[in-house]
Image: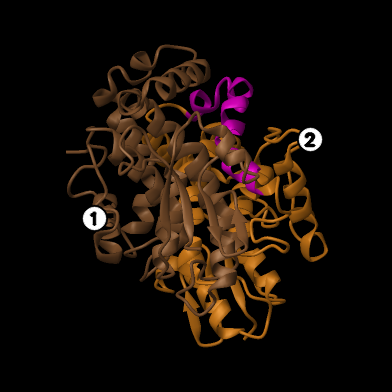
Chain colours: A orange, B brown
Amino acid sequence: MARQLYELVGTDPARRFSPFCWRSRMALAHKGLDADVIPWRFTENSRLAALGGKTVPILLDGEATLTDSWDIALHLERSYPTAPALFQGLPETYRFIGAWADMVLHPALAKLIVSDIVPLLGPSDAAYFIESREKRFGMPLAQVTAGREARLPEFRALLAPLRRVLGTQPFLGGATPDYADYTVLGGFMWARSVSPLRLLEAGDDLHAWRERMLDLFGGLARGAPALEA
Amino acid sequence: MARQLYELVGTDPARRFSPFCWRSRMALAHKGLDADVIPWRFTENSRLAALGGKTVPILLDGEATLTDSWDIALHLERSYPTAPALFQGLPETYRFIGAWADMVLHPALAKLIVSDIVPLLGPSDAAYFIESREKRFGMPLAQVTAGREARLPEFRALLAPLRRVLGTQPFLGGATPDYADYTVLGGFMWARSVSPLRLLEAGDDLHAWRERMLDLFGGLARGAPALEA
């Protein structure tokens, strides 16, 4: 059986917008591996439960089923040791940037783009998404993202630690990209896939880094359906 | 000549409170190396200029002079390769947590403790410190730290990414501490050395981590002069 990666989509199965799925998709490409896209939508919980998972990405690779992006990365590193290393050292030392992406970058992005996701979803997914996210934010989603252009400077300031690193080296991984880069790129791919908002200014070292990331692996990320102008 | 580490002090040469000096002091201990403390005070610029540096720490190690904590860490790793590794992988991948500590943790700490530093300094150092920091903050230092107890929850929330990692593994370096841990500990040692403010609550995974860090190397950090209750 071909390798399969379950990835979140809306009505368009080509527009894969989960930040966590992007981590795994880039990790596969880093290892030189392909995987069939298995489109998955928000309300299809039973399909994941049948695999022992609750969220995407899920990777089926031979006998192995991995139900979380971190486990997928560890699995790829262990199972394909002769392919380029995802972790240029102990994987444990990559947890901090993952936690920062999950707990700082993603919530900040959500406040800028969450309402853009709704029109990309079919009716039942949209209903689920609106209800669950309005509960999380405690307000209508249009209100969450209201005035977002004015909040972009604050968002960009939050990225200062990334910007400092990427002002001194081309990738978070140093001279070459590694799983730290894919971890952070996931958030930017999420936004790029669903929102027209221009998050980064040209001239920002972080913008230049994202351009380099979009070009990797024959433009894998750049070729994905995007709404960002 | 014995190895020498220039470290920031105030009137008491035993109270070494620079977060960057603590990174180097812990890195030396990690490598099993000793270094004489060379006390340095804020207004003694000419002593550093003579060594080609502008700030502490500065390490003199045989023929080598290193004028920055990052260069010191790289030097120790390169020069003492058989001692335990400070970087469990590419040093470049440790830059993000360093940037986060410098740009998020330290500024947040400064807003809680900066006024506590003044009484620890002699007259000319205090005058320099007050003037330069009031210029940086745009207000009297007592005003910077005013109402700080009420701001502790906000400070602790900022530490969420650290807390998540340290809820799953004992050290930022994984099973054992490494330069990521010393990088973050520096900020906490700065605060502990100068301020009575209780930054972390007992029961916080981050508090437990700091306790483990204080115990390392025969209690090197725990034995340092502290004001935190």
Residue lying furthest front in this view?
B1
Q: Residue at x 34, y 44 (%)?
A: B188
Q: Which residues are magenta?
A: A141-165
Measured along the vertical axis of the image, is residue A71 above or below residue A164? Answer: below
> Which quarter of the picture shows residue A51?
bottom left
Magenta stretch, main secondary structure, is: helix
Measured along the vertical axis of the image, is residue B147 above or below residue A79? Answer: above
Asked if residue B115 can be seen in this view, the reply is: yes
Q: Amino acid at mark 2?
A: Ala
Q: Residue at x 51, y 43 (%)?
A: B56
The image's mark for residue B211 is: 1
- Would residue B25 be counted in the magenta stretch? no
- The chain to which mark 2 is attached is A
Q: Name the element at disc 2.
A: loop
Image coordinates for residue A88, horizontal then vertical, percent: 60, 71
> For mark 2, what is the residue?
A202
Describe residue B64's horizontal placement relative to residue A98 as left or right. right
